[in-house]
Amino acid sequence: QVQLVESGGGLVQAGGSLRLSCAASGRIFSINTMGWYRQAVGNERELVARITSGGSTNYADFVKGRFTISRDNAKNTVYLQMNSLKPEDEAVYYCNAAVRSYATEYPVDYWGQGTQVTVSS
């Protein structure tokens, strides 16, 4: 069994910063792409940023230049540094990882429980 545990959400004023973390644990053989998604009230879940095991990244246009995704492969952890936050960034942020465990031959998508980010104007 694999678990993703997020932390770092909270309340911040517009223009402020937050750093989200997501640690994967369990019988992990390898992790391919890790990413962050978000879902605001009334909206569908959308990609924010993702990073491959080799460090290649891609970002949604609405966060380019403000958010930075990174990962520590030794710790099976992915981070999202969020700067210049806007009220429209308010959402529940979910961690996602394509994990190959010792029990599976192919990577399986796992999701964290979500962490709330609230941006006050």
Image (tube, rainbow, N blue to C red):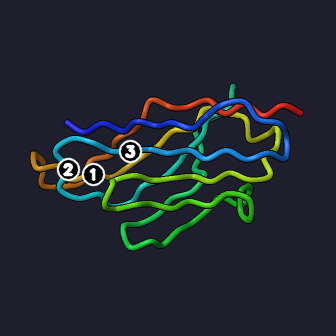
Q: Is residue 24 left or right of residue 51?
A: left
Between 71 and 1, the one nearer to me in the picture? 71
Residue 89, given in percent of the width and then of the height, sits at: 74, 41
**Three-letter code for the amino acid on which mark 3 is drawn:** Ala
Label disc, if present, on residue 28 of the rendered structure:
2
Above or below — where is 34 with respect to 57? above
Find numbered disc 3 in the image and state the secondary structure of the residue it sits on.
strand
Marks 2 and 3: in contact by CB < 8 Å? Answer: no
Find numbered disc 2 in the image and state the secondary structure of the residue it sits on.
strand
**Three-letter code for the amino acid on which mark 2 is drawn:** Ile
Label disc, if present, on residue 99 of the rendered structure:
1
Q: Quadrant of residue 119?
A: top right
Label disc, if present, on residue 23 of the rendered structure:
3
- Image label count: 3
Residue 91, given in percent of the width and then of the height, sits at: 67, 33
* Disc number lying in front (2 or 1): 2
Q: Earlier in the sequence, mark 3 or mark 2?
A: 3
Q: Earlier in the sequence, mark 2 or mark 1?
A: 2
Marks 1 and 2: in contact by CB < 8 Å? Answer: yes
Distance from the alpha carbon under mark 2 to that under mark 1? 7 Å
Distance from the alpha carbon under mark 1 to that under mark 3? 12 Å
**Three-letter code for the amino acid on which mark 1 is drawn:** Val
Residue drawn at the location 57% of the way across and 66% of the way down = 58
Marks 3 and 1: in contact by CB < 8 Å? Answer: no
